[in-house]
Amino acid sequence: MEIREFGDADWAQVWPIVREVVRAADTYTYDQNLTEDDARKSWIEKPPGRTVVAVEDGRVLGTAKMGPNRGGPGSHVATASFMVDKDVRGKGVGGALCANALEWAREQGFAGMQFNAVAESNVAGIRIYERLGFEIVGTVPGAFEHPTLGRIGLHVMYCDFG
C-alpha cells in the first residue's frame, strides 16, 4: 500500500468512500445529505493543509485530510480526519493513514495533533489513535446523535509532540 498526495483523478474513488461514511452517520458529524460538491470542498484541503489517499494496485483504499486545527493563535496544533473503504476496514489502512498524518504534522513543525470529535462508539478508531500516542483529554456527553445508540459522547483526543 502506498500513501500519496491526492490527485484530481482520485476523486472518482474517494467520493464513494466519503459518501458511505457520511451516510452511515455513525462516526462523523457531517450532514447525511452532504452533496458531492460540498463533500469535495470540505474534504480536499488547501495549503497549508494536505489530502492523501492510500492506494494499492490502483485502488483507493482510504483517504485522509490534515492541516491546522484552528487559525491564528491555535494554528500550531494540527488536526486530521480519516475515511477507509468499508471493504478493507480492520486491515491497517486507517492506522497507516494516521501514522502518515502524524509524521507530516511533526515535519511541518506542529506542536501536536488534536481530534475535536471522535464518537465514543468508534472503538476501533480510538484504539488506533491511542496506540499512536493520542489520549482522550475530554468528552462532551451526548454530543453525537448515533443512528442506533442514541446520544453518545464525543471525545476530544490529543497527541503532544513535545
Image (cartoon, rainbow, N blue to C red):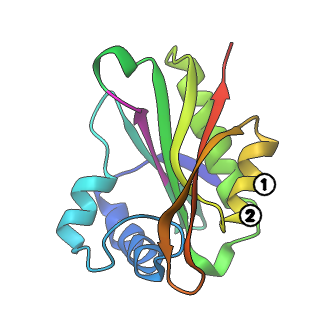
97 vs 157: above or below: below
Residue type at mark 2? Ala
- Badge 1: residue crowd in 10 Å (few <14, some 14–19, many ≥20): few
Q: Secondary structure at mark 1?
A: helix
Q: Residue at x 56, y 16 (%)?
A: 111
Is 62 placed above or below 70 here?
Answer: below
Give the CA distance from mark 2 to mark 1. 5 Å
Q: Is residue 159 above or below residue 66?
A: above
Q: Residue at x 33, y 55 (%)?
A: 43
> Looking at the image, which residue sits at the far bottom?
148
Disc 2, SS = helix
Q: Which residue is mark 1?
A: 127
Residue 36 lies in the magenta-colored region: no
State which quadrant residue 105 falls in. top right
Specify start and end residues of the magenta stretch as a single range. Answer: 64-70
Q: Main secondary structure of the magenta part?
A: strand
Q: Is residue 88 left or right of residue 32?
A: right
In front of the other: 117 or 84: 117
User: In the rendered image, which residue does mark 2 sit on?
Assistant: 124
From this viewpoint, which residue is outermost toward the left? 37
- Residue 47 on image: x %, y %: 29, 31
68 is within the stretch colored magenta: yes
Q: Residue at x 81, y 44 (%)?
A: 131
Q: Point out residue 97 in the picture as x, y percentages from the top left corner.
A: 61, 49
Q: Which amino acid, by three-letter code, is at mark 1?
A: Arg
Q: Residue at x 57, y 87 (%)?
A: 148
Asked which quadrant contains residue 18, the reply is: bottom left
Q: Which residue is the extreme one toward the front?
A: 141
Report the front residue among 92 and 132. 132
Determine whether label 2 and label 1 are within 8 Å by CB: yes
Location of residue 129 in the rendering, given as x and y in whole percent from the top left corner: 71, 46
